[in-house]
Amino acid sequence: MSQAPIPHGEPAHRLAALGLALPRVPEPRGAFLPFSRIGSTLWLAGQICEWEGEVRFTGPVTDIATGREAARICALNLLASLSLALDGDLDRVVRCHRLGGFVQVNQGWPDVPKAVNGASDLMAELFGETGRHARTAIGVASLPANASVEVDGIFEVR
């Protein structure tokens, strides 16, 4: 796992005010990078709900609160990758354009979008209006490491 530089800037202050910290950037579980950048567009690879290498939520999500917490952990992992890509300077974020959320569920569970709100709400809390984004929320049969949730993102940066 890579340690991102200590985040700084207004979003980092908001993160601390919420009593949150960023984890180490998780090791990819396949042949891919944690992020890719072309010009001002930064794509963040999907992050599962693991914390410092331990998958915190596994199996199908059956309640909104659990799904939201799992998605929030995914978002913190995304922010760790974002911080790594921006040398810790989260003030370089122009906008979060899109999040994609994948929630392991049993067929027919209707609250996938409400679960992914755990990631979306954190982006809005940290970045304000520039953290509001387009989004996809999809229920799936399985995810890497049997994780309950995975979230990826696309950001515009300076």
Image (tube, helix red, strand yellow):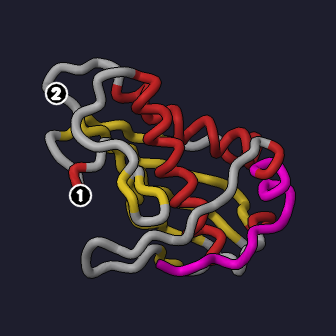
Q: Give the residue type that dot 2 points to.
A: Asn
Q: Residue at x 58, y 63 (%)?
A: 23
* Figure quadrant of residue 149: top left
Q: Residue at x 20, y 40 (%)?
A: 140
- Queried whether the magenta region covers residue 5, the answer comes back as yes
The image quadrant where one finds the C terminus is bottom right
79 up-or-down from 138: above or below: below
Q: Give the residue type that dot 1 points to.
A: Pro
* Figure quadrant of residue 133: top right
Q: Earlier in the sequence, mark 1 or mark 2?
A: 2
Label 2 packing within 10 angstroms: few (<14), some (14-19), many (20+)? some
> What x and y, as percent, mark residue 29?
28, 71
Q: Secondary structure at mark 2?
A: loop
Which range of residues does the magenta coloring cover? 1-15
- Queried whether the magenta region covers residue 107, the answer comes back as no
Residue under label 1: 144
> What x and y, as percent, mark residue 47?
41, 59
